[in-house]
């Protein structure tokens, strides 16, 4: 399956909402993965986009006029429209930059093993029109872009990836919070570049951003009520402690190795299988175990068996 640049896939009209110079185009099911929600900014000098999810292929000329792409982070579902914009300038947080530059960089970013990498590449080329962007440029925390009567500001909020960044459009006060997506699934920090510790800090800092509108990459879409946003943020954050408690419950039932805990699953249902499930579960559980060890709440013996302290 492919979509030549400038050609839109036949699709029902894409729903949108506008906030001044900012437009949000909703992906399927409010951007539920594998789709996402597309933010476009009509600066008086430059037309800009935040990420490029699958829905970008259905928007047409309004998306294809994009001259500047500022990516909140690097993942396959956020790069699905880059093939349509070969001449646009692409900026990525410097911590995620190598993942956008090349497939080898993306493999390291995911933490894929060599055996699964070819199948993953075939998957994202087919389903996400994946192309690397070796021309992409890096940006740092606090970077800004003046696109004409509108400014984009970058707030580095790592955890989901090392470079995950919230992008604020002023004066509209629209914050694209990306994959701090507030879904019922909860935070995802299962890649090689992810960090549970950083995710906790980012979630605590998120309410400090001076926004009036919050846009998620996936599923939730747009929040215009701060109280609603904060309630869903609290529920999303609580998933971290719920996962910790599930691990402690599993260990109280019987001591277990990391491999045995992975078999029980923490993120996904026990029968869930994918190219990344085992590696994501392993990294997620390992990070929680590290926190629990540091807090003295669990201990591990020489055979790698964990038990409550």
Image (tube, helix red, strand yellow):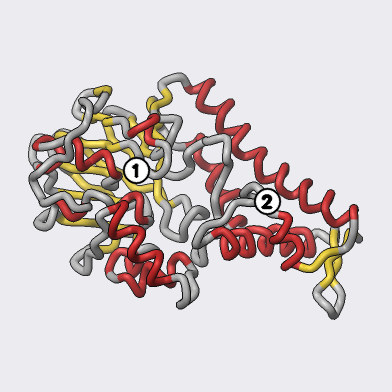
Per the rendering, the mark at residue 49 is none
Q: Which residue is mark 1?
A: 167
Nearest the viewer among 147 and 250 is 250
Q: Residue at (22%, 43%) from the top-left corner?
A: 49
The percent position of residue 59, horizontal first and vertical second, equals: 18, 35
Where 13 falls versus 273 (above or below)? above
Relative horizontal placement of residue 209, taking residue 129 as reference (left or right): right
**Residue 43 visible in this rendered orientation of the protein:** no
Q: Residue furthest bottom?
A: 302
Report the residue at 75% width, 60% height from top: 261
Q: Quadrant of the C terminus?
A: bottom right
Q: Earlier in the sequence, mark 1 or mark 2?
A: 1
The total of numbered circles placed on residues is 2
Residue at image position (33%, 58%) is 124
Q: Is residue 100 visible?
A: yes
Question: Measuring 22% from the left and 47% from the top, which residue is drawn there?
Answer: 145
Along the horizontal axis of the image, is 239 left or right of 43?
Answer: right
On the image, the x and y values in percent for residue 75 come to 38, 56
Q: Is residue 226 left or right of residue 283?
A: left
Q: What separation in Å lies between label 1 and label 2 (alpha carbons)?
A: 36 Å
Other residues around mark 1 within 10 Å, as few (<14) / some (14–19) / many (≥20): many
For the residue carrying disc 2, how many other residues have a C-alpha within 10 Å: few (<14), some (14-19), or many (20+)?
Answer: few
Compared across the picture, whether 6 is left or right of 100 comes to left
Give the residue at mark 2: 270
Taking 207 as reference, is 194 above or below it?
below
Q: Position of residue 3 (x, y in %)?
A: 16, 49
């Amino acid at each position: 399956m492919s979509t030549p640049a400038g050609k839109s896939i036949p699709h029902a009209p894409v729903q949108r909402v506008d906030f001044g110079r900012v437009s949000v185009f909703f992906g399927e099911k409010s951007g539920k993965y594998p789709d996402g929600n597309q933010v476009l900014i009509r600066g008086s000098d430059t037309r800009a986009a935040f990420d490029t999810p699958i829905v970008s292929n259905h928007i047409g000329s309004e998306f294809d006029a994009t001259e500047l792409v500022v990516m909140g982070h690097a993942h396959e579902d956020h790069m699905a429209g880059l093939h349509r914009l070969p001449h646009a300038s692409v900026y990525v947080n410097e911590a995620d930059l190598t993942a956008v530059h090349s497939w080898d960089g993306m493999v390291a970013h995911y933490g894929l093993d060599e055996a699964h990498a070819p199948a993953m590449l075939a998957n994202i080329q087919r389903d996400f029109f994946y192309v690397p962007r070796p021309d992409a440029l890096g940006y740092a925390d606090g970077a800004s872009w003046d696109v004409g009567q509108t400014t984009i500001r970058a707030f580095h909020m790592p955890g989901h990836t090392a470079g995950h960044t919230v992008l604020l459009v002023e004066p509209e006060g629209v914050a694209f919070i990306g994959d701090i997506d507030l879904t019922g699934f909860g935070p995802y920090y299962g890649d090689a570049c992810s960090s549970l510790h950083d995710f906790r800090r980012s979630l605590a800092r998120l309410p400090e951003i001076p926004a009036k509108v919050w846009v998620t990459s996936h599923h939730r879409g747009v929040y215009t009520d701060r109280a609603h946003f904060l309630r869903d943020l609290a529920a999303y954050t609580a998933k971290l402690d719920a996962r910790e408690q599930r691990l402690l419950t599993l260990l109280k039932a019987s001591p277990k190795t990391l491999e045995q805990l992975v078999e029980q699953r923490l993120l996904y249902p026990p029968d869930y299988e994918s190219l990344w499930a085992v590696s994501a579960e392993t990294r997620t559980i390992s990070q929680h175990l590290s926190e629990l060890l540091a807090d003295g709440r669990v201990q591990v013996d020489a055979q790698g068996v964990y038990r409550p302290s």
